[in-house]
Image: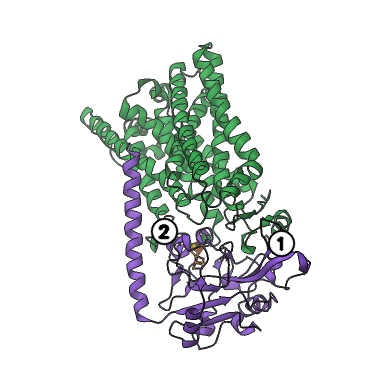
């Protein structure tokens, strides 16, 4: 049996399919203006209001293992090579002050959420197509279709997905994959996502691709995305993070 | 579930994404590639006799086919038991997403079960089935009459045609077996978000370890069933199987060595985390069980038994023990891939913790029960379609 040929053939088939999908994705995008999410970590104070607002708005179980959005704290201590990262209960209750001010060299909070990738691996791997990308660039899960195989959870490099637990409050969503939708039910009616509304400092910004305000922020700052090497092309842009944030 | 997660949360080490506390693919997903590996491996043993005309392993030809079938029938069980919505399982086949490796499962499975294995077994047994259908009365006779599918022609030309069909199917089946398991490896190897899985070598490593486990399984079942039936196993056959086990082991270990050299040489992102994973988290299941007990010891035992030409009975015993250790080792390999890949956080900064419940959904007991199923199916299959020549003739 020729194993090499098998490998070559299977990767050719796989890349062919992926190429095809890409072409289709781009086409779809041309038609509608997508959304953009911008996070300015210089403004985030780690209060956790966004986390609480999200859990309430979206019926996310309140236990500390289920998050559509959460906040991480990055701390560089003086004289230490390795940075410290934590996210107690996803930042739901804010952050206890465990570092004394004069030992900290630098620190900031990084809100995380689904990146609504342009090339989402979660969509690629879903065996039944329950995870999909809308024409305006939002990645959603169809709870009526998801079989709960959890392949998409493995494929997301950002830990953005979780399995809605069997005892979760929203019955129809139980045992299916769940994640941030950018509050699709709100934004399609012209409202902002719940986390954006709840943020007291404006660290979270959201708008259409042609939104002047968003465009100016993107122009005036150097922005980056998380794990660019994964080739997922995230649509959540960060201002003020170091490369250690991933 | 959340009791378990509470325990897990207490054992989390370093920083992981908050959603990563739960290990989403449980022990059942380790059982799944293990079982499909055994299918592919057992089929490869059967094909050896057919395609390469290896006379010595003839006594295990039919046994290997039935073993492959028994395990293949079981293969979807761990998957379906693991789904959040098992009642929607068939959607994988009705509305597959063509870009998903997992969507292939149903098709590869159906192809292998319906086209390759069943046809091969049917045509290989057809002559015997017709004979039994004529001789037997009662329920057994009725079963055989159904199994003939209405074709009672066992003239010389008909049996020659059967032979030809089986040969063709074997030639189709061998690459199919490779594909079946290669694709399972691809499911993991293509998850680029996970440095412990993401590797183009994954399908090949899975394939070779599948061969190793399949040969070991057929060897063990052959010897043990002979003992149960009170006949002595054919020593030449066992010798040959042990040689195959040794060769495929050497290839398998070589490949894994290449894989590890790659990881250690390139030191890509996540390397430190992988190092800690091997040294701390997986030390027992990987270094001790998979590598030492499951590979080095059986390889050494087979080599010693061969080189020093132990007496027949001792040799067969040594081979059998090696085969069983091998089966344990390959399971450990599946475990280390599936569970290991998930306790390593995608932050590369910490480790989650897997709690395997003893009872309940996705527990150790369900996994164990699923592992017993193929043996029960095999028992039934052997009763209906005796693979042993002497019985087939005297029946
Ligand atoms: S961040 Fe994860 S869940 Fe969101 S689109 Fe990307 S891969 Fe999918
Ligand atoms: S868990 Fe649901 S959404 Fe995720 S890959 Fe499986 S079927 Fe698709």
Please tell me how crowded label 2 is: few (under 14), some (14-19), or many (20+) other residues with Cα within 10 Å: many
Element type at mark 2: loop
- Where is the N terminus of chain B found, in terms of image quarters? bottom right
Q: Residues within 10 Å of mark 1 (few under 14, many from 20)?
A: some
List the single residue furthest toward the left: B157
Disc 1 element: strand
Q: Position of residue B135 (x, y in %)?
A: 37, 30
Q: Please state which of residues B341 and A102 is positioned toward the viewer in this rendering.
A: A102
Chain B rendered in what hue? green
Please provide percent x and percent y for residue B223: 51, 24
Residue to which mark 1 is pinned? A77
| B109 to the left or right of A161 | left
In the rendered picture, chain A carries what hue?
Answer: purple
Q: Is mark 2 within 8 Å of ligand 2?
A: yes
Q: Identify the residue under disc 2.
A: B100
Depicted B75 relative to depicted B24: above or below = above
């Amino acid at each position: 049996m020729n194993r090499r040929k098998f490998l070559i053939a299977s990767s050719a088939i796989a890349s062919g399919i992926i190429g095809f999908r890409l072409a289709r994705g781009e086409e779809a995008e041309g038609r509608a203006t997508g959304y953009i999410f911008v996070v300015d970590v210089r403004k985030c104070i780690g209060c956790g209001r966004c986390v609480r607002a999200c859990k309430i708005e979206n019926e996310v179980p309140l236990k500390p293992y289920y998050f559509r959005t959460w906040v991480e704290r990055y701390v560089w201590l003086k004289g230490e090579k390795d940075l410290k990262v934590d996210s107690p209960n996803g930042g739901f209750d804010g952050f206890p002050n465990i570092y004394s001010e004069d030992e900290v060299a630098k620190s900031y909070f990084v809100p995380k959420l689904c990146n609504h990738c342009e090339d989402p691996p979660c969509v690629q791997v879903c065996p039944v197509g329950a995870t999909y990308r809308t024409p305006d660039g939002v990645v959603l899960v169809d709870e009526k279709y998801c079989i709960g195989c959890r392949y998409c959870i493995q494929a997301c490099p950002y830990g953005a997905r979780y399995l809605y637990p069997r005892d979760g409050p929203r019955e129809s969503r139980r045992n299916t994959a769940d994640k941030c939708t950018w509050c699709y039910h709100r934004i399609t009616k012209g409202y902002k996502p719940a986390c954006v509304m709840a943020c007291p400092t404006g660290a979270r910004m959201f708008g259409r691709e042609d939104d002047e305000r968003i465009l100016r922020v993107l122009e005036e700052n150097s922005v980056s995305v998380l794990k660019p090497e994964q080739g997922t092309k995230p649509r959540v842009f960060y201002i003020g993070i170091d490369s250690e944030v991933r | 579930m959340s009791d378990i997660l509470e325990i897990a949360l207490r054992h989390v080490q370093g920083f992981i994404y908050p959603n990563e506390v739960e290990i989403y693919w449980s022990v059942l997903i380790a059982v799944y590639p293990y079982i499909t590996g055994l299918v592919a491996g057992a089929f490869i043993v059967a094909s050896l006799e057919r395609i390469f005309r290896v006379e010595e392993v003839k006594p295990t030809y039919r046994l290997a086919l039935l073993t492959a079938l028994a395990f293949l029938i079981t293969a979807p069980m761990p998957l379906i038991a693991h789904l959040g919505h098992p009642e929607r399982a068939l959607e994988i086949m009705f509305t597959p997403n063509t870009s998903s490796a997992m969507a292939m499962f149903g098709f590869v499975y159906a192809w292998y079960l319906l086209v390759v294995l069943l046809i091969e077994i049917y045509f290989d047994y057809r002559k015997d089935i017709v004979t039994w259908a004529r001789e037997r009365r009662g329920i057994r006779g009725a079963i055989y009459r159904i199994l003939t599918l209405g074709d009672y022609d066992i003239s010389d030309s008909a049996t020659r045609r059967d032979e030809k069909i089986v040969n063709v199917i074997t030639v189709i089946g061998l690459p199919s077996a490779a594909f079946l398991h290669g694709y399972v490896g691809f499911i993991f190897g293509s998850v680029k978000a996970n440095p412990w899985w993401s590797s183009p070598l994954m399908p090949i490593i899975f394939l070779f370890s599948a061969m190793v486990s399949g040969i070991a399984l057929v060897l063990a079942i052959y010897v043990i069933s002979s003992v149960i039936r009170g006949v002595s196993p054919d020593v030449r056959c066992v010798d040959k199987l042990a040689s195959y086990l040794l060769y495929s082991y050497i290839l398998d270990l070589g490949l894994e060595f290449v894989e590890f050299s790659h990881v250690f040489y390139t030191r890509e992102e996540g390397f430190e985390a992988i190092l800690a994973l091997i040294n701390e988290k997986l030390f027992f299941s990987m270094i001790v069980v998979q590598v030492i007990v499951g590979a080095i010891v059986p390889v050494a035992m087979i080599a010693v038994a061969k080189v020093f030409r132990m007496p027949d009975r001792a040799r067969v015993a040594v081979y059998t023990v090696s085969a069983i250790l091998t089966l344990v080792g390959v399971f450990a390999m599946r475990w280390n891939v599936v569970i290991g890949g998930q306790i390593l956080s995608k932050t590369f900064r910490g480790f989650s913790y897997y709690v395997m419940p003893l009872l309940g959904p996705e527990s150790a007991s369900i996994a164990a029960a699923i592992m017993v199923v193929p043996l029960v199916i095999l028992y039934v299959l052997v009763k209906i379609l005796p693979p042993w020549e002497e019985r087939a003739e005297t029946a």
